Image (cartoon, coloured by chain):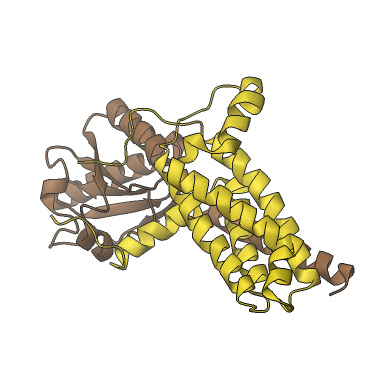
Chain colours: A brown, B yellow
């Protein structure tokens, strides 16, 4: 192979790797919200704090670069907001749940209501601002729901 | 409950620095391999090719990182003596297990290239080298541990057996 072809192929390789990296980076901390639904709970109640309005359920794993960083952020958010708890589980201990809830990366954080229903999911590492924003949204929609029941 | 925590973390920029060196070396390997990807000649000739020698050395370095742990990798020593004193303290610490696992994945991929080339498989070295390059490039530039992401998917697919409850 001549050197021009080789150079072009190497450039293509770097380009493809960069695209993959940008795609991953763009998806880090992506939030998806679940449609509100009734029974049964998505998450076993034993894994959440049922006395809290919202549990930040973090899925971690033995080979996870950002789980420690996420632990600090979620711990801070739960300390700053009354009624918010942080729980962390290892995907190795809960393979069934990991499969059932389609957790395919660590960290994954689920915002779970006291009834065990998932409000939203944060894929990958995120920051305190985004998590705080999502928590505020969850609390607001919980409030709206309970007001509805009163009527 | 959580087993992924480690009492002492490492500076996450250390493994990324090492991955940077590795990715450049792998890109050179792929370039050298591409100029003659046929994997022809005798076994001794193939084993003497610069691309092969380079990939063999890189495989050995991956094996070192995987077996001795990322803290004892020669690049880690380079980082802590030459680079780290010039940097601000890290924003967070990383457990040593993920980058050590990444070294194991890197070893498996690169040693596949070594074996394929010795066996005379055309493009074997180039393809394995490219895969290893992509993984180390993603680690160096974006801080993504590809092997770690795969691990979660393997657990979910039940390919890796979990501990008995």
Q: Quadrant of residue B28?
A: bottom right
**Residue at (57% x, 55% y) in the render:** B59
Does residue A120 lie above or below B121 as drawn? Answer: above
Q: Residue B13: percent from the left, percent from the top? A: 57, 35
Does residue A42 lie above or below B96 as drawn? Answer: below
Q: Residue B19: percent from the left, percent from the top? A: 60, 46
Q: Is residue B59 visible?
A: yes
Horizontally, residue B147 falls left or right of residue A122, namely: right
User: Considering the image in quadrants, where does the C terminus of chain B appear?
Assistant: bottom left
User: Considering the image in quadrants, where does the N terminus of chain B appear?
Assistant: top left
Q: Residue B66: percent from the left, percent from the top? A: 46, 48
**Residue at (88% x, 68% y) in the render:** A4
Q: Nearer the viewer, residue B151 or A22?
A: B151
Horizontally, residue B8 falls left or right of residue A1, namely: left
Q: Residue B72: percent from the left, percent from the top? A: 50, 35
Does residue B124 lie above or below A70 as drawn? Answer: below
Q: Nearer the viewer, residue B32 or B153?
A: B32
Q: Is residue A125 visible?
A: no
Q: Nearer the viewer, residue B14 or A109?
A: B14
């Amino acid at each position: 192979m001549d050197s021009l072809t080789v150079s072009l192929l190497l450039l293509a390789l770097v380009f493809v790797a960069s695209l993959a990296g940008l795609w991953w980076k763009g998806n880090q901390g992506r939030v998806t919200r679940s449609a509100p639904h009734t029974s049964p709970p998505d998450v076993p109640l034993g894994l959440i704090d049922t006395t809290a309005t919202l549990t930040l359920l973090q899925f971690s794993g033995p080979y996870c670069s950002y789980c420690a960083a996420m632990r600090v952020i979620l711990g801070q958010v739960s300390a700053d907001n009354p009624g918010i708890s942080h729980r962390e589980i290892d995907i190795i201990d809960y393979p069934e749940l990991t499969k059932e809830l389609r957790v395919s990366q660590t960290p994954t954080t689920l915002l779970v209501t006291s009834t065990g229903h998932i409000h939203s999911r944060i894929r990958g590492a995120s920051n305190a601002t985004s998590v705080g924003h999502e928590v505020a949204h969850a609390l607001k929609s919980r409030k709206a729901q309970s007001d509805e029941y009163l009527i | 409950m959580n087993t992924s925590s480690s009492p002492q973390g490492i500076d996450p920029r250390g493994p990324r620095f090492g991955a940077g060196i590795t990715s450049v070396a792998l890109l050179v390997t792929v370039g050298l391999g591409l100029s003659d990807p046929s994997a022809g000649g005798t076994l001794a000739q193939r084993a003497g090719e610069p691309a092969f020698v380079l990939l063999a050395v890189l495989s050995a370095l991956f094996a070192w990182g995987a077996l001795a742990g990322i803290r004892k990798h020669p690049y880690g020593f380079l980082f802590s003596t030459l680079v780290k004193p010039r940097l601000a303290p890290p924003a967070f610490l990383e457990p040593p297990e993920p980058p050590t696992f990444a070294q194991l994945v890197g070893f498996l991929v690169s040693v596949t290239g070594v074996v394929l080339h010795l066996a005379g498989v055309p493009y074997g070295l180039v393809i394995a080298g490219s895969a290893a390059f992509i993984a180390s490039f993603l680690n160096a530039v974006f801080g993504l541990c590809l092997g770690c992401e795969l691990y979660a998917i393997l657990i979910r697919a039940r390919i890796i057996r979990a501990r008995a409850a």
